[in-house]
Amino acid sequence: MVISSPAYAGDDPPVPGAGARAVAARCETRVNVLARRMTRDAFARLPGYDELPSDVKDVEIAATARHGLRLFLDRVAAPGEAPGDYEYFRERAAQRADEGMPLRLLLSTHLLGTQVLWRALRDVTRRGEEAALAELGDFLFTAQERIVAAVTETYLDERAAILAERREERRSLARALLEGAPAGAEGDAFGEGCVVLFLSFPSGGARSVALRRLVRRVQAVLDRAFGGGVLTLLDGAGGHAVVPGGLDVTGVPDELGVLLREACGGAVRVGAVGAEGVDGIPAAARTAEEVVRVARACGRPAGLHRLDDVLLEYHLSRPSAGSERIAALLEPVLDRPELTETLRAYLELGQDRRATGRRLSLHPNTVDNRLARVAALTGLDLTSSYGTALALAALLLREVGGEPGA
């Protein structure tokens, strides 16, 4: 990406006088020598410079150094910027960004190059020309500011475009894997098995800039938890993630829900299901979403949910020939949310009336009264294992069909 708009809106550089032009002219025959001094001596001291390919150092960076030297000398001789003065620097900056050169290293070459040129001007200055050298210094450092601004702007724009393209490529790969579409060679990393996650963010979600920040934070948490390579397809309500590397659900950190809660600023539910290969990813994604729905419906606190954590509840929530009749058992209490809330907590907490009271901030006698009312209205015997299993199945069949929530 090359941007031709002006990079600097400050004052025009000072116009060098005749004395300054005379000093600068003494360096015109030394352009090649100075360029070699920059690329072979000065730049070699920079961390990471020696690791660059030889053609980049000896050809491209050397050519940029020569261009910068000649541009400076030409502008001293004929003051005033011309259209395209910074175009070459922009093109090289975009190329370096595409190659992945660190911005720190790129800018350091420009700054060190300026130092080499300043020393060369100082060396050719004669006694009595100190004022002319000062003029050249003002001119040089103003020119340097404009070049560095142009280089930085172009580099950052190019890196942003590259990162956006890569993010979209990763989203496309995630979408293909989750939908069971051909994923090409990039899908091979998931052929040995993977884990599919379904994430449900706090209610309300996020929009625009806040959503992008949320997705970046979630991506960072997942990459740290699994060592990178996690594909995500997320929106303001949540979404899916696919973790490669032959991992199974036992490798999902127990603290993942806590880490995501800290990143998102609210309770996050995560369903984790293993897939044996690429072909199993779509089914695993659906199951992970169902696991979250079941965990929410039966009152489990937000966090990480594996299928084994809700295995019985998951089974009871599956539709069958008798599902409608079982679900209908709770119709008499549907308009009494305090009763269904108490029933859900009571079943989740292993029929412990005191624990239920603590969770709902109720006296145990109030819990007993509510459960007795449920039993009276529905005919369910909540003192028997059969009755509690039937109540749990009815609750799950009524609620799991809804949208997952936090």
Image (tube, rainbow, N blue to C red):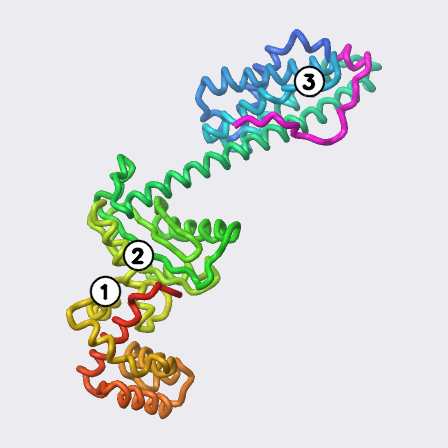
- Tell me the CA gap for discs 2 and 3: 60 Å
Segment colored magenta: 1-23
Q: Is residue 60 above or below residue 93?
A: above
> In what quadrant of the picture does the C terminus appear?
bottom left
**Residue 372: percent from left, percent from top:** 30, 90
Q: Please state which of residues 369 and 140 is positioned toward the viewer in this rendering.
A: 369
Q: Measuring from the top left, give residue 168's x and y in whole percent.
A: 40, 40
Q: Which mark is residue 308?
A: 1
Q: CA distance from mark 3 to mark 1?
A: 70 Å
Q: Position of residue 330 (x, y in %)?
A: 27, 80
The answer to which of 381 and 356 lies nearer the viewer is: 381
Which residue is at a point 37% across and 82% down the rendered structure image? 336
| Magenta segment main secondary structure | loop
| Amino acid type at mark 1 | Asp
Q: Disc 3 designates what residue?
A: 82
Q: Residue at x 45, y 17 (%)?
A: 55
Element type where label 2 sits in the image: loop
Q: Are marks 3 and 1 in contact (CB under 8 Å)?
A: no
Counting residues from the start of the chain, the first of labels 3 and 1 encountered is 3
Which numbered disc, 2 or 3, marks the residue that appears first in the sequence? 3
- Residue 5 part of the magenta segment: yes
- Which residue shows up at 68% across the image and 9% down it? 28
In the image, residue 209 sits, relative to residue 81, either above or below, namely below
Q: Tag 3: residue type?
A: Ala
What mark, if any, has residue 252 been given in the picture? 2
Which numbered disc, 2 or 3, marks the residue closer to the eye? Answer: 3
